[in-house]
């Protein structure tokens, strides 16, 4: 191993670029048809093959004997480019050459014709790093490029590139590489290098590299240099400080089902070492992403075991899209800090993700008004309003509106069938009281995501509410804890902050509403991390029927 892997294994032809099939096909066609654009923009995450593809393109358009759009890698031009000796390929790293002087030099330079090939190619890497003045100078060149010049701009942050530049380029979006693509590539590499390593170990390497082939190859190379050419899974896991697949999988299970207690127990077993949690976090994101895929489409591409894929598909069927998105967002928001113990932001994020009782957890459509007025009663008058029970009430959901039924429906997850539901009162008052649709509520939360009150983020204050409903001209937001209610209450003392919120409600609900806050005292003894039905049953609750909102409100709620 005399060369760094990623250089040695850098693709030298379009057909060797992995994971970007449609891009390389388009570029090959362009070369074949001799329809070369003057400027290309390659956008995509690091290690996705942008610069390698740019170099192959440089060879292909100058090669003396291109073969079906590919460089032959044998003529002098190809050899010079491969060995970085070509005068016609100029590579600029904008991360280190941000200044206008560099672009001015480039501007003067572009007028000289190429020395050996047909084109002079400028690859500007990390082009978003250029200063504005440099951008403008580049723009002038892009407006009237000499016919022998081709620009290939590469960036990991395309949103920072001036739109006027983007619009002058033919743009290609490089996809982040899939784990299985990276694994296949590493497998081939190990075979050729005579390295003994099994697929599971390579999977670990690929996962740590998060979509970057270059990182994956570097990690693998480091492992081989340190541990030799026979790598056991255990060695790899220890070296990378990874593992915990089982724990991560269980964790995502309990996050989705809302079992906060179990979540914290698992985090405890993982321990609080920094890298452990970072890896678990990354794995959680991968799992929840797959659940989202399972929810939105049938196909999941993943190197996970069939058994795990099956479970993930089940979760996709079981949980509602808002619930999955909610968990995804909370997990995405976890930011590890260098100063704090890592376990704190991680625990906080997981607890948040697993305790979203304002949304219905399961796979129901978002109209809550049909069955949201169900009470659970315990011997000592423990009463709670639950929307989650909808999952157990499929047949009620399907009943036509306003139809009064006398059926008694056993609750499916109660072993001795002692709980029965009398849904006589369903839909009573649904004309005057309307539960907000989950989709509307999510939109409002999302819209207010960056709105800050005096002390708190407004979206966060709304998010911890447990129910939202409309009564005539009022939007009533219910909290479980008085402290949560009080925080928002203090914020909306300020007229301007109240207006921000009420304007947002108007925008998404189509009408002006006055905001009212309340505390559902009946919920205070509840363990909010759990599916409320299960939790209540654990407490000995028996579901006896539904009541309308008004009576709950009059009896047990405190209006603010
Ligand atoms: Zn050639």
Image (spheres, rainbow, N blue to C red):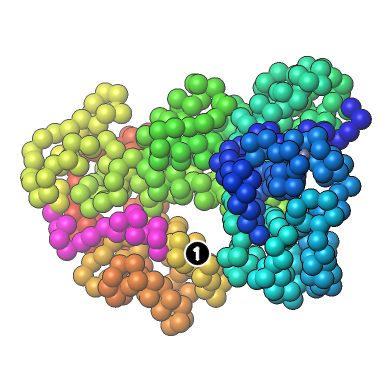
Q: Among all residues in the image, which is located at the extreme bottom?
A: 495
Total of numbered circles in the picture?
1
Give the camera-side residue of 61 and 40.
61
Label 1 beta carbon within 8 A of ligand 1: no
Residue 389 seen in the figure:
no
Residue appearing at x 82%, y 21% in the figure: 193
Give the camera-side residue of 519 and 334.
334
Residue 97, quarter of the rendered image:
bottom right
Residue 538, quarter of the rendered image:
top left
The 10 Å Cα crowd at callout 1, few under 14, some 14 to 19, many 20 or more, is few
Residue 13 seen in the figure:
yes
Q: Is residue 33 above or below residue 263?
A: below
Residue bearing the label numbered 1: 449
Q: From the viewer's perspective, is 486 left or right of 413? A: right
Tell me the element at label 1: loop
Q: Is residue 137 above or below residue 116?
A: below
Q: From the viewer's perspective, is 505 left or right of 214? A: left
Residue appearing at x 14%, y 34% in the figure: 408
Counting from the top left corner in percent of width and height, residue 390 is at 27, 41
Ligand 1 shows up in the quarter that is top right
């Amino acid at each position: 191993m005399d060369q760094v892997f990623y250089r040695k294994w850098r693709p030298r032809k379009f057909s060797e670029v992995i994971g970007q099939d449609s891009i390389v096909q388009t570029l090959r066609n362009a070369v074949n048809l001799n329809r070369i654009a003057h400027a290309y923009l390659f956008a995509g995450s690091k290690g996705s093959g942008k610069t390698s593809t740019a170099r192959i393109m440089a060879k292909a358009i100058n090669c003396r004997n291109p073969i079906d759009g590919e460089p032959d890698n044998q003529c002098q031009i190809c050899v010079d480019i491969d060995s970085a000796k070509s005068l016609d390929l100029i590579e600029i790293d904008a991360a280190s050459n941000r200044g206008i002087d560099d672009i001015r030099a480039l501007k003067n330079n572009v007028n000289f014709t190429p020395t050996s090939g047909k084109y002079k190619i400028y690859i500007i890497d990390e082009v978003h790093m250029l200063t504005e003045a440099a951008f403008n100078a580049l723009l002038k060149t892009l407006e009237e490029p000499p016919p022998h010049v081709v620009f290939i701009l590469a960036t990991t942050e395309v949103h920072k590139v001036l739109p006027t530049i983007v619009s002058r380029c033919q743009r290609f979006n490089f996809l982040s590489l899939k784990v299985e693509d990276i694994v296949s590539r590493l497998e081939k590499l190990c075979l050729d290098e005579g390295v003994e390593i099994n697929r599971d170990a390579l999977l670990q390497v690929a996962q740590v590299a998060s979509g970057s082939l270059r990182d994956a190859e570097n990690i693998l190379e480091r492992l081989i240099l340190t541990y030799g050419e026979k790598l056991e899974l255990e060695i790899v896991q220890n070296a990378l400080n990874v593992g915990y697949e089982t724990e991560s999988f269980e964790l995502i299970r309990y996050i989705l089902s809302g079992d906060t207690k179990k979540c914290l127990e698992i985090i405890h077993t993982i321990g609080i070492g920094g890298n452990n949690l970072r890896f678990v976090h990354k794995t959680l994101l991968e799992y929840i992403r797959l659940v989202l895929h399972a929810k939105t489409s049938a196909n999941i591409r993943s190197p996970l075991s069939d058994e795990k894929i099956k479970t993930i598909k089940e979760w996709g069927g079981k949980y509602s899209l808002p619930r999955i998105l909610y968990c995804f967002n909370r997990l995405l928001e976890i930011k590890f800090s260098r100063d704090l113990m890592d376990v704190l932001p991680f625990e906080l994020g997981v607890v948040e993700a697993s305790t979203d009782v304002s949304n219905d957890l399961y796979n129901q459509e978002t109209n809550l008004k049909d069955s949201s007025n169900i009470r659970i009663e315990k011997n000592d008058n423990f009463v709670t309003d639950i929307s989650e029970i909808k999952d157990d009430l499929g047949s009620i959901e399907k009943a036509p509106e306003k139809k009064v039924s006398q059926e008694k429906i056993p609750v499916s997850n109660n072993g001795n069938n002692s709980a029965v539901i009398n849904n006589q009162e369903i839909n009573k008052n649904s004309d005057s009281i309307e539960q907000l649709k989950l989709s509307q509520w999510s939109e409002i939360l999302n819209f207010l995501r960056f709105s800050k009150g005096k002390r708190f983020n407004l979206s966060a204050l709304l998010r911890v509410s447990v129910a939202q409903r409309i009564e005539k001209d009022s939007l009533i937001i219910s909290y479980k804890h008085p402290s949560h209610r009080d925080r928002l209450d203090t914020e909306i003392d300020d007229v301007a902050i109240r207006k921000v919120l009420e304007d947002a409600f108007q925008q998404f609900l189509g009408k002006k509403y006055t905001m009212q806050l309340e505390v559902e005292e009946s919920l205070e003894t509840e363990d909010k991390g759990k599916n409320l039905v299960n939790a209540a049953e654990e407490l000995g609750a028996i579901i006896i029927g539904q009541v309308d909102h008004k009576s709950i409100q009059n009896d047990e709620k405190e209006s603010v």
